[in-house]
Amino acid sequence: MAEALRVGIAGLGTVGASVARVLRDKAVELTRQCGRDIVVAAVSARDPKRDRGVDLNAAKWFDDPVKMAQAAEIDVFVELIGGDEGPAFAAVKTALEAGRHVVTANKALLAKHGVALAEIAEKKGVLLNYEAAVAGGIPVIKTMREAMAGNSVTRVFGILNGTCNYILTRMEAEGISFDACLKDAQRLGYAEADPTFDIEGHDTAHKLSILTSLAFGTKIAANDIYMEGISNITQADIRAAGDLGYRIKLLGVAQRTESGIEQRVHPTMVPTASVIAQVHGVVNAVAIETDILGELLLSGPGAGGNATASAVIGDIADIAKSRPGFQHGPVFGRPAKELKPYKKAQMRSHAGGYFIRLTVHDRIGVFAAIAKRMADNDISLESIVQHAISGEAAAQKTVILVTHETTEAAVRKAVDGITKDGHLTDKPQVIRIERAG
Ligand SMILES: NC(=O)c1ccc[n+]([C@@H]2O[C@H](COP(=O)([O-])OP(=O)(O)OC[C@H]3O[C@@H](n4cnc5c(N)ncnc54)[C@H](OP(=O)(O)O)[C@@H]3O)[C@@H](O)[C@H]2O)c1
C-alpha cells in the first residue's frame, strides 16, 4: 500500500473538529477508497487546551499555522481558520509555496486572493481544493470543474446563504416580521450575533464570485457585484408575491449578456412552481444553465460541521488518490494565467421583469400618474393591482405593478418620477423577477 497521506489541520472549530472526527470514524472506509491511510499528523488552533471532542494527541501541535504550513510532517495543509487576510492567507500561501497541497473552506480568502493562490498552486504542481467554500456540502465545484467539459454556461444562480433562506422561509410560513425572524434565528444558532455579513448579501457575493470564475473563465471579481440584502423585505412583499404566484429568495446570479457578465445578489421573485422555490430553510441550491446540458439544479446542506466536513474530506480523498507525477487540473477550470479579465455588464442594462410595490395617497389621479410614468419609460405592465389599506392608514393605498421584460434603467427612472410626483407615502419597493425552471 502507498505511504499514508499526512494531513495538517489549521483551525479546529465547527468545521475543523468535524473533519478530524470524521477522518477518525471513517478511517477504514477512507483507506479502502483511497488505497492509502489518511492520518492527521499536525494540528493548529489558538487554544491548545480546549477539548475538541476528538483525541488529537498523536498529532503534532503548532501554535503558528504558518509554521505548520511548511512543516516536513505534512503533505496536505487544511485551512479551516477563516478570514481573507491574517493567518489563513499567510499559511495557505506559505503551504503552496512550500509545495504542499491545500484544502480550504474559506470563500472570503478565495474571493480576494483566489487567482493569485491558484497561480502559485499551478506553478508548484499542487492542488488547491475548495469544495466546501461554496454551498457547503453540495459538490458544485467538482461538478463545474470536472463534469461539464465542453458546456458553455449561460447562467449560474443559487440560494447560497442558509441564514437568509431560513429567515425568508419562516417569514412566509409564519407571517412574522424580518426582525422577529432574525432574533429567533440568532437564538437558534442559525444567524451570527452580527448578521450583517449574511443578511446584506456579502457571504452570497463571495460564493457567487467563485462560481462566476468557474462558469465563465474570468478572473474573480468579488468587488464588482451588485448587492442588496433581505433586511427590507416585508410581509406585504411576501404576501403580494404569493398572490402573484412567486416566492422571494435571496439569489446570487451570474449571467452572460451581450455587454458583459452580470453578477448580482438581491432578493428575487421566482415562480412558486419552480424547483428552486421549493428549497426551504437552511438548505442551499445552485442552478447551472448550459448550452448542452440545459438546467441542472443541485441542492443540499450548505453549512454545518458534518456537511462541510464531507466536502473537505472529499477534497482530501482526491489528493490521497492522486499519484506523484500526475498532472492536476487547473484550480478554476482553466489555467489561472489564462483566466480572462472580468467584463462587467452594467446593472442599469439588466433586462427582466420587475415587481414594484407603492404605498400612495388615496386620491384621484394617482393611479393615472403612475401609469403615465410607466408608459413614458416604455414599460409594459403585466398586471397592476390596487388595494385599500384599512385602519389608521385608510387614506393610503397599495399599488402593485408587475412589468413585462424591461430594463433596470427604465424602472429606476419611472420609480424616481413617481417619487418626485409626490404621491408616495412610503419608500417604494422594487424586486427583480428571475426566470427559473
Ligand atoms: N461553519 C460552517 O458551517 C461553514 C460552512 C462552510 C464554510 N465554512 C468556512 O470554514 C472556515 C472555518 O469555519 P468555522 O465555522 O469552523 O470557524 P470557527 O468555528 O470559528 O473555527 C475557527 C478555528 O480557527 C482557529 N483559529 C483562529 N485564529 C487562529 C490562528 N491565528 N491560528 C490558528 N488557529 C486559529 C480557532 O481556534 P480556537 O478554537 O482555539 O479559538 C478555531 O478553532 C471558515 O472559512 C468558514 O467560512 C464554515
Image (cartoon, rainbow, N blue to C red):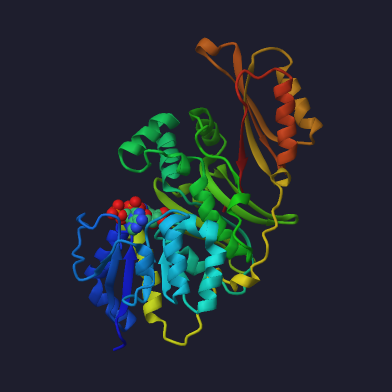
- Residue 301 appears in the rendering: no
Nearer-the-camera pick, 193 or 263: 193
Q: Could you tell whether 269 is left or right of 258 in the image? A: left
Nearer-the-camera pick, 437 or 45: 45
Q: Residue at x 32, y 66 (%)?
A: 9
Q: Residue at x 53, y 69 (%)?
A: 118
Q: Position of residue 434 (x, y in %)?
A: 61, 47
In the rendered view of the protein, which quadrant contains the N terminus?
bottom left
Q: Position of residue 46 (x, y in %)?
A: 29, 55
Nearer-the-camera pick, 122 or 330: 122
- Residue 333 appears in the rendering: yes
Image quadrant in which you'd find residue 77: bottom left
Image quadrant in which you'd find residue 155: bottom right
Quarter of the picture for ligand 1? bottom left
Q: Could you tell whether 54 is left or right of 304 in the image? A: left
Q: Position of residue 141 (x, y in %)?
A: 49, 65
Nearer-the-camera pick, 70 or 411: 70
Q: Could you tell whether 420 is left or right of 64 in the image? A: right
